[in-house]
Image (tube, rainbow, N blue to C red):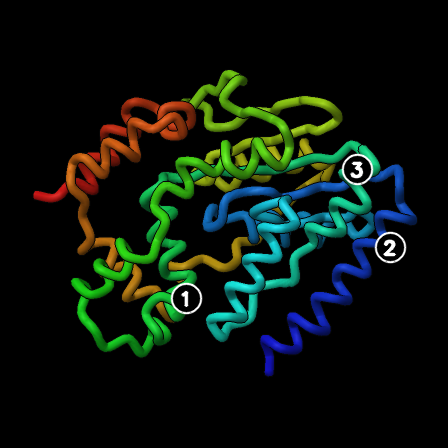
Amino acid sequence: MKRFFKYHIYDRLVLSKKAIQLNIWKHNTPIIVHTMAKVGSLSVYNSIKRLMPKTSVFHTHSLDVEVAKKDVTYCFDNGIYPGSRSPVSLIHDKIISKQRDYKIISMFRDPIERNISAFFDAFELYAGTKPEVYAGDLEHLEYLFHKHLPYTYPLKWFDDNFHNDTQIDVYKYSFNAEIGHTIIHQDGIEVLIMNCYLEDSLKEKLIGKFCEISKFKLVNTNITANRTSGELYRRFKEFIRFDKAYLEECYNSKYAKHFLTEIQRKLAIKKWLKD
């Protein structure tokens, strides 16, 4: 009932409010927190939205209307409600089709860390039970992880999603992985890209300046390790390891070489490599 109410009533009201904001405060630049899933984007979205009541702030993982529809269908076909009602149609109707300028905040993360977090975020879908009551062993979870999770998703997201959604090829712009953040300007779109592992104090400074929010404060939410599934999540991270070929595909990818330093990539391979 709670999920039904959120999706069918609360989320409709939220989108209606955003449409009103876009119509009334047309001088305010819309902000889209547009990232791959499981990089801490919900915390950024909620924190900005709370402090900018006259600006339309959105949270998306794809700006493709058809992809959004397929995601909703997939959830309902598997007997679960989507996490939220998609704002993609509204974004297309009120922002993209009208060629309004807008800002994007996007983040990236170590690909294996992201994938494990994503696996636990959809744990009930993959394992058929909630993580807090899971009675199986870690070997079976490892099997489910490899069977169901599209592990190349983070490696391809900036090509398959971000580039297709915005026509911005982030790989054409230089990026200092030591610093971990940059701003891109292209065709009326301003993009802040950040490493999700940056210190919160630095994120607050970057986001505050980018969104023109004085004294911006980041409030962290939806952290997998802090949920009731946290203990199983930690045990699984300590248990699972990968073969060399798998790790080389991840950490020698265009994505990893662009956003991570050589030292970060070598340390990640060492951490996740099977004995």
Q: Secondary structure at mark 1?
A: loop
Above or below, 251 against 76 in this view is above
The residue that appears at 50% across and 44% down in the rendered structure is 36
Give the image location of residue 178, x and y in percent.
41, 22
Q: Residues within 10 Å of mark 3 (few under 14, many from 20)?
A: some
Instruction: Give the distance between the C-alpha atoms of the residues marked 2 and 3, in whole angstroms.
Output: 14 Å
The residue that appears at 38% across and 25% down in the rendered structure is 254
In this view, the residue in front, 30 or 226, is: 30
Above or below, 143 against 213 in this view is below
Give the image location of residue 252, x and y in percent.
29, 27
Which residue type does callout 1 highlight?
Arg
Which residue type does callout 2 highlight?
Ile
**Which residue carries the number 3 mark?**
29
Which residue type does callout 3 highlight?
Thr
Q: Residues within 10 Å of mark 2 (few under 14, many from 20)?
A: some
Residue 48 located left or right of residue 151? right
Looking at the figure, which quarter contains the N terminus?
bottom right
Mark toward the viewer: 3 or 1: 3
The answer to whether the residues at label 2 and label 1 have Cβ atoms under 8 Å apart is no
| Outermost residue to the right | 24
Q: Earlier in the sequence, mark 3 or mark 1?
A: 3
**Which residue carries the number 1 mark?**
227
Give the image location of residue 199, x and y in percent.
47, 38
Instruction: Give the distance between the C-alpha atoms of the residues marked 3 and 1, in whole angstroms.
Output: 34 Å
**Which residue carries the number 2 mark?**
20
Give the image location of residue 86, x and y in percent.
65, 57
Q: Earlier in the sequence, mark 2 or mark 3?
A: 2
Residue 142 located left or right of residue 150? left
